Image (cartoon, rainbow, N blue to C red):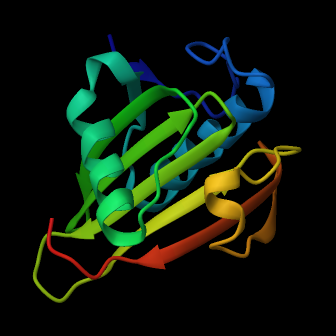
Amino acid sequence: MPYVVDFKNVSTVGLESSAVPEALAGLRANEGRYYSNKYGNVFAVSPASEAPEVVDRVSRILKEERDIVIGSRPLEATAFEVDGLRMDYVFYESELSINVMYSIEDGGKRAVGFKLADGMEIPEELASKFKFARQKSKLAGVIRGSYFVIKGEY
């Protein structure tokens, strides 16, 4: 059952098994607010077990592009299209969020983004491969993020 992310009343629904569910809920709400404000899109997530195709697609791109396997358990996932982009999101138990932005048209933007909730250590599988920049968020405190450009076709 999809959960519509409320960025005005941040909730830990679906994220309770995370070590710091409040921080991950803030990160999720931050993403919901962005898509609502920029595109008027409702950001709804489902338990990862109900969206295995999204988790598999994100995992496949990480593995094939950069030989990355995320060690943490996926908690929630979503996929939607907005402004000519297919967006996939997976939120992990370790307070990590991964999104895949994939332009539907050839030659468009295609990238993988990583965001870490406030206070989370950079996962070992990412630490040696990426530098993370900091960004302040009213909903999530300090978010650290990084990305890479997708070269292959998916």
Query: Is residue 82 toward the left or the right of residue 115 in the image?
Result: left
Height in image: 64 above or below 21? below
Percent x, y of residue 35 = 46, 52
Q: Image point 82% across, 44% down: which residue?
A: 120
Percent x, y of residue 137 = 79, 54
The quarter of the rendered structure image containing the C terminus is: bottom left
- Between residue 22 and residue 64, name the one nearer to us: 64
Percent x, y of residue 44 = 40, 30
Q: Image point 10% across, 83% down: which residue?
A: 106
Query: Is residue 4 toward the left or the right of residue 58 in the image?
Result: right
How many marks can you see? 0
Q: Image point 33% across, 76% down: which residue?
A: 150
Height in image: 142 above or below 14? below
Return the residue found at the far bottom: 107
- Between residue 154 and residue 123, name the one nearer to us: 123
Query: Is residue 16 toward the left or the right of residue 74 in the image?
Result: right
Q: Which corner quadrant of the image does residue 101 belong to?
A: bottom left
Percent x, y of residue 58 = 33, 50
Q: Image point 68% across, 29% down: which residue?
A: 25
Q: Which corner quadrant of the image does residue 99 belong to?
A: bottom left
- Between residue 147 and residue 87, name the one nearer to us: 147
The quarter of the rendered structure image containing the N terminus is: top left
